[in-house]
Amino acid sequence: MPAPMSWPAQVVTVCFAAGDDADWFAAAEKVHARLHAHGTPARRYHVRHRRLIGWLTRFFGYYLLDAARRFGAVTLAAGGRKSRLDLTGTAAKATHHAGLRWRAWNTHIGTTTKPARPWEDFLAQHLADPTKITLNEARRRFEQQPRVLAMLASAFDPYELSVYQAGEATYVGLHWRIALVGDALITTDGRVLSPASDSVADRFRFLNEACGYLRNLRPDARVCAVAIA
C-alpha cells in the first residue's frame, strides 16, 4: 500500500537499481502502482558533462530519460543514470534562484511589514474544532494579516510564510532539496518516502532522508522525476 500523503505530490522521484528496466514506462508504472496516480516526465536535472570528454558526450543522450537540447547539446533531462546527472549543478541553480526570491521578499516584505502567523497555525485551529472555525474562516483570518496581503500583492506564495520568516538559509535549504527529490520518492525496492504531514518540519525530515538516500545510490543506479497531473 502507498504511504499516506497529507497533500498531493506534485513531483515524485522514482529510483531504479542498476540493471533494472528504467525507462519512462517503468517509472510511470511504479508511480501508478504505489501512489495510484498518473504523470509525465519532469525535466528537472541538469546533465553532467565531464571535463575531458564532455565536448563530445554533451551531444549524446545515452543513459538519459526525456532529454532536452539547446543548440544541439543535451542540457536537461527528466532522469537517467545517476552518473550522467549533474545533481550538484541542479541544487546550485535552485539555491541561486531561491536566494534571489528570499532577498526580494526580505526587501519588499520582510523589512516593511510585521511578522505574521503562518498558515499552519490557522489550519491547526480548524482541525482542532472544525465546527467553530471552518476552513474558509481559517483561510480568511490567515490572509487578512498585513504581511500575507503584501505577499499576495507581490506574487509571493503566502503559504511559504513560515519558511520565509525562518531566514534565507532555511528557505534556500528547503528549495535545493526539493529540486533534487521533489515531493515524494520511491526507492529501488518500492518503498514510498514522503512527509508525515504538511508541516515544514516534516517536509524537512522527509527531504533530508530522501536526499541521503539519493546520495547513497550507486553511480549506475537510475532516477526519474515524474510530474503528477
Image (spheres, grey):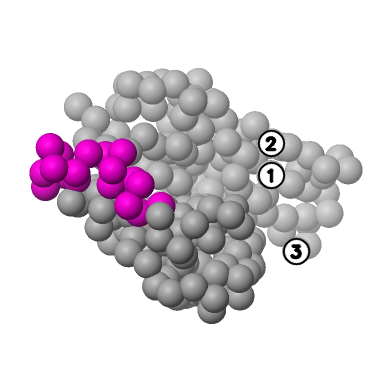
Residue flagged by tag 2: what amino acid is it? Ala
Q: Amino acid at mark 3?
A: Arg
**To which residue does mark 2 refer?**
67
In magenta stretch: residue 162: no
Q: Is residue 104 left or right of residue 226?
A: right
Query: Which residue occupies 61% across, 71% down?
Result: 108
- Compared to 34, does 114 lie above or below? below
Q: Closest to the observer: 127 or 80?
A: 127
User: Is the Cβ of the residue at disc 3 closer than 8 Å to that at disc 1?
Assistant: no
Judge whether residue 127 is colored magenta: yes
3D distance between C-alphas at marks 2 and 1:
6 Å
Image x and y of residue 63, in percent: 62, 38
- Residue shown at the point (25%, 57%) measured from the top left: 121
Q: What amino acid type should be assigned to the residue bearing mark 1? A: Leu
Residue at the spot 72% in from the left edge and 55% down from the top edge = 49
In magenta, the rendered stretch is: 126-143
Residue occupying image coordinates x 78% and y 47%: 58
Q: Quadrant of residue 73?
A: top right
The residue carrying pointer 1 sits among few (fewer than 14), some (14 to 19) or many (20 or more) residues within 10 Å by Cα, namely many
| Whether label 2 touches label 1, CB < 8 Å | yes
Q: Residues within 10 Å of mark 3 (few under 14, many from 20)?
A: few
Task: Say if 47 sits above or below 68 in the image.
Answer: below
Secondary structure under tag 2 reads loop
- The answer to whether residue 184 is visible is yes
- Which numbered circle lies on residue 76? 1
Q: Report if residue 91 is visible in the image.
A: no
Whichever of callouts 3 and 2 sits on the residue coming sooner in the sequence is 3
Q: Earlier in the sequence, mark 2 or mark 1?
A: 2
| Element class at badge 3 | loop
**Mark 3 sits on what residue?**
51
- Number of residues whose C-alpha sits closer than 10 Å to that of mark 2, classed few (under 14), some (14–19) or many (20 or more): many
Quadrant showing the N terminus: top left
